[in-house]
Image (spheres, rainbow, N blue to C red):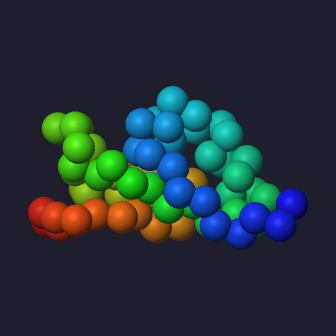
Amino acid sequence: MGVSNISVSVDFAKTNIEMMSYIKELGVNSYLYNVNIESWTNENFVLKYFMDNAYGLYSDDWQF
């Protein structure tokens, strides 16, 4: 495929869980962005529910 890294929004990851799992199986690292844009997308929530299928995340404001 030639792609090794992608970035997707947290909202995309939320609505495409099976696709995110498949992307990970292909060996593609996905990075999540738009953390802290919505009230439900804080770092703790993203780490708990989305990091099984993602490699990393972008966040301007870490609130742990």
| Residue 59, image x, y percentages | 28, 63
**In the current view of this chain or complex, which residue is farthest to the left?**
63
Name which residue lies at 58% across and 38% down: 17
- Looking at the rendered image, the quarter that the N terminus falls into is bottom right
Name the side, left or right, on which 20 lies relative to 45: right
Name the side, left or right, on which 41 lies relative to 26: left
Name which residue lies at 22% across and 37% down: 38
- Against 14, residue 59 (above or below) is below
Name the side, left or right, on which 28 lies relative to 45: right
Name which residue lies at 66% across and 48% down: 21
Can residue 60 be seen here? The reply is yes
Q: In this view of the protein, which residue sits in the foreground, 5 or 25?
A: 5
- Against 57, residue 21 (above or below) is above
Q: In this view of the protein, which residue sits in the foreground, 46 or 8?
A: 8
| Residue 29, image x, y percentages | 62, 66
Can residue 54 be seen here? The reply is no
In the figure, residue 53 lies in which quadrant? bottom right
| Residue 62, image x, y percentages | 18, 67
- Looking at the rendered image, the quarter that the C terminus falls into is bottom left
**In the current view of this chain or complex, which residue is farthest to the right?**
1
Name the side, left or right, on which 31 lies relative to 37: right
Name which residue lies at 62% across and 46% down: 20
